[in-house]
Image (cartoon, grey):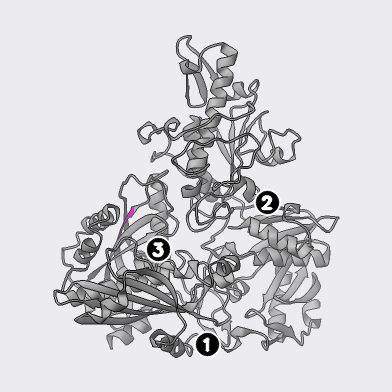
Amino acid sequence: MTNSQHTTDMKRRTFLASASGLTFSLALGSAGMLGTAAQANDSAFKVNAWITIGTDDSITLMVPAAEMGQGTLTALPLILAEELDADWAKVKAEFAPPNPKVYGNPHPLLNGGQASLASVAVAGYFKPLRILGAQARLVLVQAVATKWNVPTTELTTDKGYVIHAKSNQRISYGEVAQFATLPAELPKISDGDLKKPEQFKLIGRTDIGRTDVKSKTNGTAQFGIDVNVPDMVYATILEAPMEGAKAENINTDEAMAIPGISRIIPLPFGVAVIGDSVHATRLARNVLKQKVIWNTTGAIAATFDSEKSKKEYADKGIDPNAKTMEAFKRGDSNAAMVNAKQTIEATYWTEHCYHAQLEPMNCIARIGADGLSAEIWTGSQFAFLGTVAASGILKTTADKIKVHQQLLGGGYGRRIAPDTIAQAVVLANITKQTVKLLLSREDDMAAARPRPMTHHVMRAGLDDAGNLIGWRHRLVAENVDAIASPPRFQATGGKDYIGWNGLDLPHYNMTDATAEAVREIRGMRVHAFRGIGAGHNKFAVECFLDEVAQAKKIDPLAMRLQLTQHDARANSVLREVAKMSDWKRKRNGRGLGIAFSDYHGSLSAGVVEVSLNRQTGKIKVHQMWLAVDPGLAIQPTNVLAQLEGAAVFGLSVALIEELTIKNGAVVQSNFHDYPVLRMSDMPEIHTKIVKSDAPPTGMGEVGVLPVAPAIANAIFQLTGKRLRALPMSPERVKKALA
């Protein structure tokens, strides 16, 4: 596939080295022939098939992305079923194996890689799946035309049937699968061959629910933590408190005396406990925690204290000689600032955050008898990266690692990292047993891959007429790409796609604007977090924009509407959320705040209504309104569900979530000292989709972004005091009020 505007020519079982990185093959076969069976079947038509059409009329799609509550197992099959004219009741989904050459995502962010991140599954696979569905439909039509000796132009399709109206005949896809054969070359599909939106029968319907919900509500859904396989032993790990820490003086006698414990294994990443039950390994782990001494001589993080380091971050924020890298530039902000008649300045902070996924990290690993192959059972956002890690440990190749993908009990970026897979493979390789590794919540948190702590220095300039003529943003933070994506970090010369996301201003009409970053190296295992860099960068941008509006003596909404008047989509979501919230109506004892955000093509705007207990410092969010433009909504009800869920996540991060670091180690250990949002603190959330002609974009993260700045802006309207740090904990609020 060259691009979305050109004719696509895809040959059966042929990998085209193009932007798509996809091999489209169509499997026609016996009833019940699913993807895993297809992999083992000798038929060339089965290998790496995307579609299997069974003689029982079932249609199975291999889904190349993980399911972590975002609806992938429904949305991707729905796209294909639309062009195939399938009977949705007969469509099934199965996880595809990790094989980017076949199942890679053509989205520019992944460029043919196969991973579930950044809300790009629907955006990336939308066009290829439509083409595949259209090709499959034409193959079926051509097979029937040949059998019935009628022109293909006289045949139509609907709900899993090929129909010949003239003779009043119809035949199901399953029946066609009994005699159809694949042509040497699949039909060519152009944009004109695909359905127009007004022809959609499945896409956009509000009565089609997510297929994974039933199993998750009746208890039959299987997550990684639920998997059991024969002859396995259990493992847990007392995780090293930081990268590079080594366990010393390990007294294992007391731990080994616990019934059911078979081995204690010191490793570079911690101390592993092997036993015959979760209970036994947990008891032994707790005993070891009291005995182990950690040597942190080789750990960069050993001297890092998140509170004490703030002065150093702040100094870098204003140091003209600090080493900076340009993240975004439009015009000449330096010259503009020199000519400014009024300069506004402010600094913002965000703390480390833990993913707090409900399901602790886990993995089952079994090494093959040859010592060069392995089977893995886990829920991963990046299973292929897991196969790379596992193959490196076994000194083999990634194709020798078979992954049984499970549902994810929360990802948020944490399950991109392959560390748990690597640990399980190491233990299975050492013990020569099938190992089920399950971290305790305490070790899950100790081994956190947090969002980085960030410091932002903001400057803006106004001219005589009060026009915004210059904008400068300096970010001081650890570089996430350096840890989470070293190849990209090296290829870009040290830039940080993850951490810098959201520094640019694509929808605001600012003539002269610059964003730059100072890299801190503190040894923390920072990683992608829901919303990635936009989560902290948009907080600074949108709060500071309100400060500029105050200096201009203009309503914050009016300023944003001015800045987006050239951008219809951005302007529309702002107008819609203002209408939803009745923006101009004053509320006694409550404040309103607004914020806008963009994320990988999706646009969102939010308004919150808050009150404040001045004695305790606790913020109460009563109402939240969110408008989103996700392009074409494949499943509108799921779009709104994702928007609401992301807002809840963002609310928790904005108000209470904070990891503190002392001597390189996470201080918090469980939810008693790392609280997350409780039901009693839930506001009423009102959501709406703003329609546009844009192609579908992602929904997993854009709802997080406007929440925190909208709350901070609402508190200013209510109290006249600025909250410039996340989380907006009661202690910080009281300090700001003082």
Q: Is residue 172 left or right of residue 701?
A: right
Gap in Å between the C-alphas at discs 3 and 2?
Answer: 30 Å
Q: Residue at x 35, y 56 (%)?
A: 603
Residue at mark 3: 704
Q: Earlier in the sequence, mark 3 or mark 2?
A: 2
**Residue type (three-letter) at the residue carrying disc 1:** Asp
**On the image, which quarter does residue 115 sit in?**
bottom right
Instruction: Give the farthest residue toward the top.
Output: 167
Q: Residue at x 69, y 58 (%)?
A: 387
- Between the C-alphas of marks 3 and 1, the distance is 28 Å
Looking at numbered disc 3 in the image, what kind of residue is underneath it? Val
Query: Within 10 Å of the Cα at label 3, are there few (<14), some (14-19), or many (20+) other Cα atoms?
Result: many
Location of the C terminus by quadrant is bottom left
Q: Is residue 645 left or right of residue 335?
A: right
x, y percentage for residue 174? 60, 25
Q: Secondary structure at mark 3?
A: loop
Q: Nearer the viewer, residue 143 or 61?
A: 143
- Of residue 654 and residue 495, the one placed in the foreground of this image is 495
Determine which residue is flagged by label 2: 404
